[in-house]
Image (cartoon, rainbow, N blue to C red):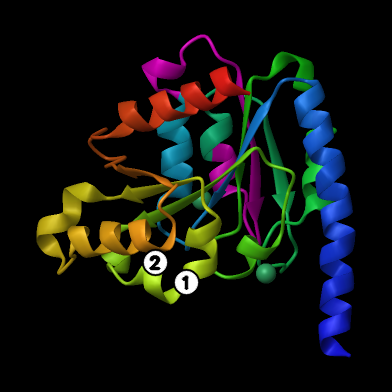
């Protein structure tokens, strides 16, 4: 019985996700679902993406999901871009109906890219299609090199993985080769970027990847 209920919820979610996908495609908007654990640096990656020279001239909007507080939405709104905050009210992931409501508050005709920052969580956000064009996981050096092995679903579904906080690697027992090899085994198609949002290292390659996805869509 429990499983049936979950399947029904996911089926209803997927129907709305399809509507979101159609709405985004009609407007030529690339939506990127940014997932990752709390503190991985999802908001910092969004900030760096918005200000990346490679994406200059593009119009980027943000949908910011958080269980509590508007801290991250305020950080991004300070960049003078459209931001819609989704207060999930305890829900530990975004779902397609929440994102639909947020999309309807944005001027999609004026947007090129919508960054959707999911709730910090490596588990259930992977199970909810939001209608995004691309899924990205932000992981980080202090979390450890075993995250790909321990949370395979999210990494398997990712179009790209951003390994953040590269500037801290000397302070942690982090095996970068192991992390990347595990990712390659699980999901050979995923693009991989090692970055530091603090120093800006690797951000250009990541921003170039986004621009390439736009050119393809
Ligand atoms: Mg955040
Ligand atoms: Zn959840």
Looking at this view, is 177 or 59 the one in front?
Answer: 177
Q: Residue at x 19, y 65 (%)?
A: 174
Q: Residue at x 32, y 29 (%)?
A: 205
Q: Residue at x 65, y 37 (%)?
A: 133
Q: Position of residue 209 (x, y in %)?
A: 43, 29
Q: Is mark 1 within 8 Å of ligand 2?
A: no
Q: Is residue 14 above or below residue 25?
A: below
Q: Say whether residue 105 is visible.
A: no
Q: Position of residue 2 (x, y in %)?
A: 84, 88
Q: Is residue 107 above or below residue 193?
A: above
Q: Quadrant of residue 82?
A: top right
- CB of mark 2 within 8 Å of CB of mark 1? yes
Farthest bottom residue in view: 1
Q: Horizontally, is 126 left or right of 122 in the view?
A: right
Q: Say whether residue 119 is visible.
A: yes
Q: Residue at x 67, y 62 (%)?
A: 93
Q: Quadrant of ligand 2?
A: bottom right
Q: Residues within 10 Å of mark 1 (few under 14, many from 20)?
A: few
Q: Horizontally, is 176 left or right of 7 in the view?
A: left
- Tell me the magenta residue range: 51-74
Looking at this view, is 108 or 16 the one in front?
Answer: 16
Q: Position of residue 41 (x, y in %)?
A: 41, 50
Q: Quadrant of residue 24?
A: top right
Q: Is residue 159 above or below residue 186?
A: above
Mark 1 highlights which residue? Answer: 151
Q: Quadrant of the N terminus?
A: bottom right
Q: Quadrant of the C terminus?
A: top right
* Badge 1 element: loop
Mark 2 highlights which residue? Answer: 148
Farthest top residue in view: 57
């Amino acid at each position: 019985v429990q499983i049936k209920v979950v399947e029904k919820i996911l089926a209803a979610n997927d129907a709305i996700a399809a509507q979101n996908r159609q709405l985004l495609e009609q407007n030529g908007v690339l939506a990127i679902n940014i997932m990752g654990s709390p503190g991985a640096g999802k908001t910092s990656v969004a900030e760096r993406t918005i200000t990346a020279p490679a994406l200059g001239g593009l119009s980027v909007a943000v949908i910011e999901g958080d269980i509590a507080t508007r801290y991250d939405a305020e950080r991004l709104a300070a960049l003078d871009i459209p931001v819609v905050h989704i207060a999930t009210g305890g829900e530990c992931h975004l779902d397609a109906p929440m994102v639909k409501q947020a999309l309807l508050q944005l001027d999609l005709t004026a947007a090129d890219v919508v960054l959707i920052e999911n709730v910090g969580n490596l588990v259930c956000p992977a199970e909810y299609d939001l209608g995004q064009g691309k899924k990205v996981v932000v992981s980080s050096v202090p979390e450890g090199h075993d995250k790909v092995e321990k949370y395979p679903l999210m990494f398997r579904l990712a179009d790209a993985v951003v390994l953040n906080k590269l500037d801290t690697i000397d302070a942690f027992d982090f095996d970068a080769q192991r992390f990347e090899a595990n990712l390659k085994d699980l999901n050979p198609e995923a693009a991989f970027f090692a970055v530091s949002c603090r120093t800006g290292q690797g951000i250009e390659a990541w921003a170039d990847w986004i621009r390439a996805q736009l050119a393809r869509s």
